Image (tube, rainbow, N blue to C red):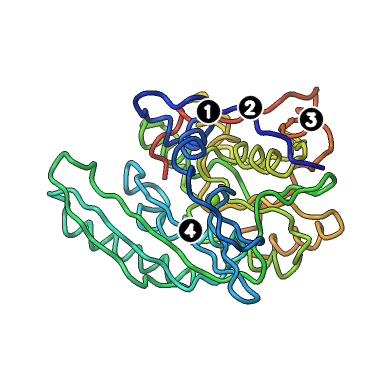
Amino acid sequence: MSTPRRPPLPRIDERITMKYGAGGRAMRALIEGLFAQGFPATPGPDDVTLSALDDGAAVRVGDRWLVVTTDSHVVKPWVFPGGDIARLAVCGTVNDLAVMGATDPVGLTCAVVIEEGFARTDLEALHASLRAACEEAGTTVLTGDTKVMGRGELDGIVFNTCGIGWASRPVTDRGLRPGDVLMVSGTIGDHGMAIMAVRHKLALEGDLRSDVAPVNGLVRRALEAGGTAISAMKDPTRGGVAAVLHEMAQKSGVGVLIRESSLPVRPAVRAAAELVGLDPLVVANEGKVVLGVRPEAADAVLAALRAHPLGRDATTIGTATDDRIGSVVMDTGFGRRLVAEPEGELLPRIC
Ligand code: MG
């Protein structure tokens, strides 16, 4: 089956607004319509490069793949319940490598841009957090850079990280076939709602914590159990699980059917999401994985996920279908409805 053309993307506005950074259709328009233009793919037919718009690139070297990913982190506030910008930088990069199949990161680069006036004690706390997160993920910072900008020229601090690792086989986000089982490694919406609760000073703030964590150990277990039966993987960050399922459906050329009753959502996240009028399905996660698995290996992969501390709440949420190619359909128990691809203006500076 040939991959259908993706729905046309919106034109990029004359001036870039916050919605272009929020992980929906607007951001995709900015990347696909501008930044990804004009960079030819590497010659390797099995390579995953910029035009694939995956979590990172995978370039074949001999009989394995060098996986590379890069991220900037601008989360506001830079410290939040459950984590801070340094932990987020390490986990975001380690997780992008892991979902490409590189679960043992060789190392990271770390560049920090600091606003004039930033407290040394705060930098020391972020440095301790950076080290702790690296230790947890079994990796290190290999090289880095620091810059300082004037007061008001930057809002506090920005981290940029790059990660490298090896994969025996890259796992993309486009390998789903009809019948594949879709699963998520735990509760959804925790990171985004924890940030929103702080920003909006919601009374529920105390019950909400970011899930930010390195998932490479968890993904390693899943790959050991499922091997090539794992057909697609992605970490549901900006745009949440909804954006990931849209990417997988459109790139794989399948439909996706999910059951609303199967989506794991903590009560505090559900309550906070209702208060601010958001669907947890579009809210960012920083310690979760969405996997597509061939049906014959689904039980083994699910058991492997659940045996890991970060995957205790792992569950199947639906299946890939040969119906409504490129769309995500939700079975609500009362009927079926289309899940829209997030546009992106709702949650700026979430990571
Ligand atoms: Mg990713």
Q: Circle 4 sits on which residue? A: 69
Residues at marks 1 and 3, CA–CA distance in whole angstroms: 20 Å
Residues at marks 2 and 4, CA–CA distance in whole angstroms: 28 Å
Q: Locate the N terminus by quadrant.
A: top right
Q: Circle 2 sits on which residue? A: 340
Q: Residue at x 63, y 50 (%)?
A: 186
Q: Please identify, in this view, whether the residue under mark 3 or under mark 2 is nearer the observer.
A: 3
Say above or below: 113 vs 33.
below
- Whichever of labels 4 and 3 marks the residue nearer the N terminus, that label is 4
* Amino acid type at mark 3: Arg
Helix, strand or loop for disc 2: loop
Q: Are marks 3 and 2 in contact (CB under 8 Å)?
A: no
- Whichever of labels 1 and 3 marks the residue nearer the N terminus, that label is 3
123 or 61: nearer the eye? 61
Q: Position of residue 78 (x, y in %)?
A: 32, 47
Q: Are marks 1 and 3 in contact (CB under 8 Å)?
A: no
Q: Circle 3 sits on which residue? A: 324
Q: Locate the C terminus by quadrant.
A: top left
Residues at marks 1 and 2, CA–CA distance in whole angstroms: 8 Å
Helix, strand or loop for disc 3: loop
Q: Quadrant of residue 330?
A: top right
Residues at marks 4 and 3, CA–CA distance in whole angstroms: 32 Å
Residues at marks 3 and 2, CA–CA distance in whole angstroms: 13 Å
Categorize mark 3 by other alpha carbons within 10 Å: few (<14), some (14-19), many (20+).
some
Query: Ligand 1 closer than 8 Å to the CB at disc 3?
Result: no
